[in-house]
Image (spheres, rainbow, N blue to C red):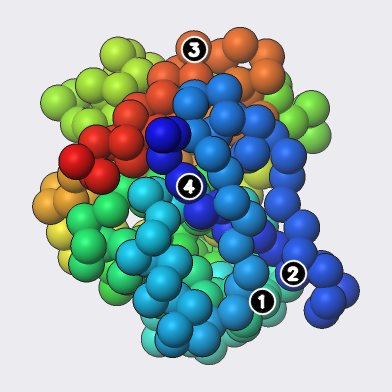
Amino acid sequence: MAPSIGVTSSIREGTLLTMGMDNAHSVVNAGGVPLVLPNIANESVLDQLAASLDGLLVTGGGDVDPTWYGEEPHPALGEVSPERDQFEIALIRRFLQRNKPVFGICRGCQVLNVAADGDMYQDIYAQSGRPLLQHSQKAPREHASHYIDIVEQSMLHSIVQNIRLKVNSFHHQAIRRAGAGFAITAYSSDGIVEAIESTQHRFALGVQWHPENMTRSGDPAARLLFEAFVHACRASRL
Ligand code: MN
């Protein structure tokens, strides 16, 4: 049987769950079965999801509430979703405890880091203190706009078989300090963190770009990332 992979969702207008179809297609094309998750941080819901799912894909979305990493809101902070933050952080912590695979995309990368007690920039342009590239690209979703440099010998390096990639970019927040047991494994040329991974778990990886939008244009690295994730989900059942 194919691995069952929980895919997190956004809450729109306070009442609607939304999830980009590219996430689901990318999981299916890599051999997994996606299940969209409800953003209800009820203990028994969280416990059963963590016990029954084989992996967790934490998708993109709005900003993370800075309260989670001990800060008050900066004026440039965007829209936050307290229910979603609470659900995802609680669920990620359960997956990490069980050493089940977690793959975080964009906001998901940041939430994974915050769940591991790391912190972040609420707005990279206001807070990084240096000139930056355009990280909120105006080009189509699947278009790769800036380069990243990947740390050699990292899991990310072994998956994509490359130390330099061109990726898409749709973020104004980014990781500042990696969480406990996590290493930074990619940077853009302006020094913004573009990937983290756990040094303790079999697969806990976050990427700041959106590979789910790049699989449709046949980007090899994007395809390899989803294949490695689904492979880890299958292996975690054994
Ligand atoms: Mn970027």
Tell me how far mark 4 sits from mark 3, CA to CA: 21 Å
Disc 2 versus disc 4: nearer the observer: 4
The disc at residue 81 is 1
* Disc 1 and disc 3 in contact, CB within 8 angstroms: no
Q: Amino acid at mark 4?
A: Ile
Tell me how far mark 2 sits from mark 3, CA to CA: 31 Å
Q: Is residue 200 visible?
A: yes
Disc 1 versus disc 4: nearer the observer: 4
Q: Quadrant of residue 159?
A: top left
Q: Which one is earlier in the sequence, the residue at label 1 or at label 3?
A: 1
- Residue drawn where x is 31% and y is 70% of the image: 94
Query: Whole-percent x and y of residue 27?
Result: 54, 34
- Residue drawn where x is 49% and y is 12% of the image: 220
Q: Secondary structure at mark 3?
A: helix
Q: Specify few, some or many for label 2: CA neighbours under 10 Å numbering under 14, 14-19, or 20 or more.
A: some
Q: Which residue is mark 4?
A: 5
* Disc 1 and disc 2 in contact, CB within 8 angstroms: yes
Q: Which residue is mark 3?
A: 220
The quadrant the N terminus occupies is top left
Q: Which one is earlier in the sequence, the residue at label 1 or at label 4?
A: 4
Tell me how far mark 1 sits from mark 2, CA to CA: 7 Å
The disc at residue 155 is none
- Residue drawn where x is 66% and y is 43% of the image: 170
